[in-house]
Image (spheres, coloured by chain):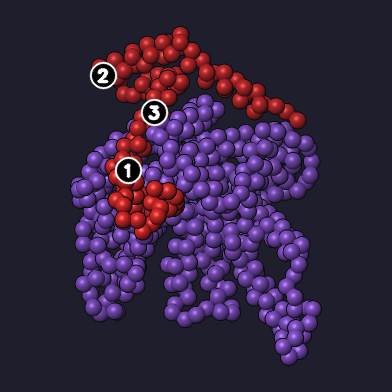
Amino acid sequence: MLFPTPEFAIFFFLVFVAAWALREHLEPRKALLVVASYYFYGYWDWRFMGLLAGSSTLNYIAGLMIANSADEKARSRIVAVAVALNLGVLGIFKYYNFFMDSLTDLTVALGIQRDMPFLEIILPIGISFFTFQGISYVVDVQRGHIKAVRSPLDLFLYISFFPQLVAGPIVRASHFLPQLTRKPALPRTAVVYGFLLILNGMFKKVVLAHYIATGLVDPAFADPTQTSSTDLIAAHYAYAVQVYCDFSAYSDIAIGAAALLGYRFRKNFDRPLGATSLTQLWQRWHISLSTWLRDYLYRALRGDRRDHGVRMYRNMFLTMLLGGLWHGANWTFVLWGAIHGAGLTAERFIKTHWHAWRNNRRRLSTVGAAAVTETLPPSATANRVATFFGWLITFHLFTLAAVFFRSPDLDTALTYFSAMFSFHGGPQLLTPFLAALTAGSVATQFLPGNKMERFAEKAKDWHALSLGLMFGGGLLLIEMIGPRGIAPFIYFQF
Amino acid sequence: MVDETIGYREKKNFWRWPSRSLLPVPRLAKREAEHARAPDTAANARTAGAAMLIAFAIFLVFESEGLRHFTRDLPGNAVTDVMVEAADSWHALMERLGPARLQPGVRDVFERVRHIRW
């Protein structure tokens, strides 16, 4: 069941009415939401409902075992087993054939070709997301960030809650589970904010992402050799915008739908295409994944010691490399992760040494209490120029790396680059409409980040009729200009 | 997201002046202050539900064509056959009255903009 469909609209309305009718009865309300979430998940393929239930059961039992164990070593062992089982399931479904494929290539290269046991495996939708949520739960219980839940309903709902089940955001147990213990509240701002997020998400997915994809990106990547350089250059920018619109749209609708049901999720995107450094980009892009990687992967690599020097750079690079691999079983994703890892490492190295050099210079140029002119902070103009170049470099690194992200294999990506930098031909696919959509989407990244919250605050006293006209009118306009039928969200495949 | 807690409205209530008056606070003002303190979830849920119903109604009137497509995609049985017939008649009515003609008009304008060349 896709979000921008009548089926989901009817489903959501019925769940909304039933959930608020059960507001005073917490346990039946949770049971209702679990049933609704399993129905939502089973709508794609009912066979994987067992996998979802199995994952929830495993993490529920692991959480209880950790809570009931006083021995720190035993707790660590339970976490290790639970994480290994979670990752094992993910590995089989997502990476088994990729490793077999790579192993076959290696044996061929070494001249010892063997028949590998390939399997016909269907990737269950959303498996990465619910696996990561399960891992975060058991690790947080072990670290003492949250208490293990006693009610299986709570954990089943945390893992399977339908707004975020299929493509995130990756909700933390420490943020979501406490919300299940109190009576849900629905402030008027949450109502308006929920509607606005849903409208925003629908517009980004149905209009922006769709037309950019079908008009420019898909034809350009289908055969880069037959596409002009102008179109290829435009398409590589457009793809970055498309993937942002597509994925952030899902997050917006998920957060909006959860808000209308009385639950709060944190922001998952915060104007990432306006970031002025790679570090900032990863603090704004898919925030729930980047913070997950930081807290559970980087921290696991780092151990209890504070990181510095080569070790820190290595761990940072490895985190991004594995983050790339998380996106899919393909060398293009690994390379994409490696580019970001190398970029982040280089940025951190340059910043660290630049600060050290500047502080050193300040110390030398300070005589007693009087600082000389050199120690004055840079002028506003210099800051603006530095910020602009920071954005320019970050944006281009992101859009160029996105070519690997979009390409089905490395050959296509390299062909794309060689055709793009051959500088031949004018725009064939690129129209003023598509150029405006792409440039306009980037321009919105420089607007204030809290504009919707501010509007929700202003519109909270609106009458139901005004809200209905705003919500219905907005959806109607999107429906009128959008296509008949809608492609699945890009992040469903991850 | 900002919580709906005690808001500016309470501070601006002129009938609260003077603040140390022994006069009883008017009932209306009292009710409003209580309302502002804790969100009236039930009323807000009703408002949200009503807004969604209005959105559905807008779709039924202006997107009756979409309703036809939706009913035709449902699995065929006696109930859905009736739904398909009802959706067809509804769409015919909306076309006759005019709202259903809005969608093709808007789409025409949009398509013209979409296909502008350099």
| Disc number for residue B54 | 3
Place of residue A8 in the rendered image (x, y in percent of width and height, measured from the top left) = 37, 35
Outermost residue on the top side: it is B96
Q: Amino acid at mark 2?
A: Val
Q: Nearer the viewer, mark 2 or mark 3?
A: 3
Please name the residue that numbered disc 2 is placed on.
B79
The residue drawn where x is 56% and y is 73% is A314
The residue drawn where x is 31% and y is 56% is B22
Q: Do the residues indicated by labels 3 and 1 lie within the same chain of the protein?
A: yes
- Pick the quarter of the image with the C terminus of chain B: top right
Figure quadrant of residue A67 = bottom left
Dot placed on the residue nearer the N-terminal end, 3 or 1:
1
Please name the residue that numbered disc 1 is placed on.
B28
Place of residue A111 in the rendered image (x, y in percent of width and height, measured from the top left) = 54, 61
Outermost residue on the bottom side: it is A368
Q: CA distance from mark 1 to mark 2?
A: 51 Å
Q: Residue A443, relative to residue A478: is it above or below?
A: below
Q: Nearer the viewer, mark 3 or mark 1?
A: 1
- Left or right of A16? Residue A126 is right
Figure quadrant of residue A276 = bottom right
Q: CA distance from mark 2 to mark 3?
A: 25 Å
